[in-house]
Image (cartoon, rainbow, N blue to C red):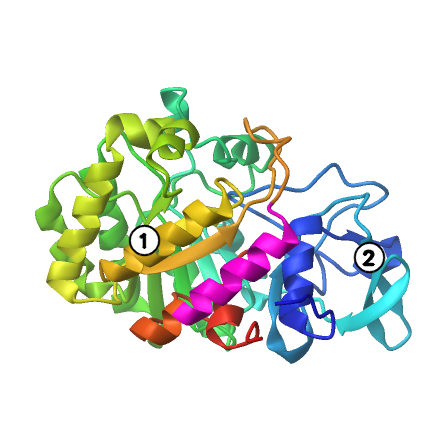
């Protein structure tokens, strides 16, 4: 497969790898009319140069949603022109882009006077994100995943609640769904408590409370550490899209990249949890998230096919070096490797009939575009 910059999915691939910069006039309305980048996690931006803020995502042609990784030296640049925004590569026009409108619920005040945006944030235009625990236990024991920026992001973004739970979280979600017709999914991230079973139960409790209160039904995706007590997996019956993040397939690199997960849970226990989930819910319900760029692409492809054979849907985020992490200087994956991976995942989707989670919503992954056939040769 060859790179085609007339294809917005290929443009997204390049932006996730190479980042993007902005002229000052292009972001003049960000934070007021357009959604600003306000993350509970994944702060990959380099220090802003001559800018107060940047958007969280860009809308590329044909509805492709792309996350923003700000890089002041990127060859990609968003510029404002009279008729809108244009994306250029080395000063050459590539396509028009749109900055998403800021959601109305960001201005909503909850019953305690706090803003709804302290509890929830907009994610990829069509979803609301909730990060239930920003104080990951893996950081507490000094064994975080080497690419994880939750603690570094927590240090610079105090506007987001460290542990949003209870009635105020539900209230914020109700406000978001009631005021934002674009929403079609809730993206829940559980983090990792010292007690994995407790964290698992708290996350499912929060989802069940939200589901009962929301003014209209939405799909729920949950990324969580698997429980030690595998009988708890039955509680995922109320969660449409449950995911456990193995991150890398190689046993050697799993220990190296994810030392806390290796020490406290273990790769073999992850595989048992996936198998137990498939036994409960059938093939195609559970997802395993990998991160492209943390291991050789051959190993990643092997892992995707191996998980698919087990009845688990492999999904892949694109690695970006985040400030404050051990991998802050690690290069992102190569464009050619991602093109090859896209072809393999498309073949896998067709063979097994799998659908990745949050199709149309994931801004830092190519799963949706691959599933939709945008990388077909």
Point out the image quarter for the N terminus: bottom right
Circle 2 SS class:
strand
- The spot of residue 96 in percent (x, y) is 78, 73
Q: Depth check: give the residue in front, 316 or 35.
A: 316
Asked whether 346 falls inside the magenta stretch, the response is: yes
Q: In the picture, which quadrant includes the C terminus?
A: bottom right
* Residue at image coords 87%, 57%: 90
Q: How many marks?
A: 2
Q: What residue span does the magenta drawing correspond to?
A: 333-347
Relative vertical location of residue 4 with respect to residue 71 in this rendering, above or below:
below
Does residue 94 appear to the left or right of 348 in the view shown? right
Picture coordinates of residue 111, whole percent (x, y):
42, 54
Q: Nearer the viewer, residue 99 or 264?
A: 264
What secondary structure is the stretch in magenta mostly built from?
A: helix
- Where is 130 relative to 105, above or below? above
Query: Which residue is depicted at the point 16% across and 53% down?
Result: 275
- Give the residue pinned by disc 1: 167
**Residue drawn at (40%, 33%), measured in percent from left and top?**
253
* Label 1: few (<14), some (14–19) or many (≥20) C-alpha neighbours in 10 Å: few
Mark in the foreground, 1 or 2 = 2
For the residues labelled 1 and 2, say whether their Cβ atoms are less than 8 Å apart.
no
User: Would residue 287 be seen by someone viewing this image from the given angle?
Assistant: no
Place of residue 128 in the rendered image (x, y in percent of width and height, measured from the top left): 47, 61
Q: In screen coordinates, is 271 left or right of 132?
A: left
Q: Nearer the viewer, residue 247 or 186?
A: 247
Give the answer, above or below, for where 258 lies relative to 344.
above
In this view, the residue in front, 119 or 45, is 45
Task: Please tell me in which quadrant of the rendered image residue 46 appears.
Answer: top right
The Cα atoms of the two marked residues, 1 and 2, are separated by 42 Å
Q: Is residue 367 above or below residue 50?
A: below
Query: Which residue carries the number 2 mark?
Result: 77
Tell me which residue sits at (59%, 43%) in the image: 320
């Amino acid at each position: 497969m060859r790179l085609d910059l007339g294809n917005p999915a290929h443009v997204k691939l390049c932006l996730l790898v190479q980042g993007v910069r902005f002229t000052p006039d292009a972001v003049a309305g960000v934070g007021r009319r357009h959604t600003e980048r306000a993350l509970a996690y994944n702060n990959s931006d380099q220090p802003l140069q001559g800018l107060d803020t940047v958007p969280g995502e860009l809308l590329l042609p044909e509805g492709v949603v792309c996350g923003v990784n700000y890089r002041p030296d990127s060859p990609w640049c968003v510029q404002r022109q009279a008729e809108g925004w244009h994306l250029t590569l080395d000063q050459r026009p590539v396509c028009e882009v749109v900055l998403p409108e800021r959601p109305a619920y960001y201005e909503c005040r909850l019953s305690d006077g706090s803003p709804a945006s302290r509890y929830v944030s907009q994610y990829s235009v069509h979803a609301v994100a909730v990060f239930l625990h920003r104080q990951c236990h893996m950081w507490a024991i000094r064994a975080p995943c080497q690419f994880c920026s939750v603690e570094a992001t927590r240090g610079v973004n105090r506007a987001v609640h460290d542990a949003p739970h209870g009635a105020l979280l539900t209230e914020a979600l109700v406000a978001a769904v009631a005021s934002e017709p674009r929403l079609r999914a809730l993206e829940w991230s559980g983090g990792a408590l010292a007690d994995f079973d407790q964290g698992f139960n708290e996350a499912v409790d929060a989802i069940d409370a939200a589901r009962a209160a929301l003014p209209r039904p939405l799909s729920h995706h949950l990324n969580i550490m698997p429980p030690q007590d595998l009988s708890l997996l039955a509680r995922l019956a109320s969660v449409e899209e449950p995911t456990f993040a193995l991150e890398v397939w190689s046993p050697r690199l799993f220990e190296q990249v994810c030392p806390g997960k290796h020490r406290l849970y273990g790769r073999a226990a992850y595989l048992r949890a996936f198998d137990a989930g498939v036994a409960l819910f059938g093939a195609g319900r559970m997802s395993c998230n990998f991160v492209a760029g943390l291991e050789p692409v051959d190993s990643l492809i092997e892992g995707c096919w191996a998980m698919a054979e087990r009845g688990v849907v492999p999904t892949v985020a694109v690695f970006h070096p985040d400030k404050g992490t051990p991998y802050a200087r690690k290069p992102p994956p190569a464009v050619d490797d991602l093109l090859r991976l896209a072809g393999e995942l498309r073949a896998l989707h067709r063979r097994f009939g799998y659908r990745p989670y949050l199709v149309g919503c994931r801004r830092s992954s190519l799963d949706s575009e691959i599933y939709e056939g945008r990388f077909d040769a």
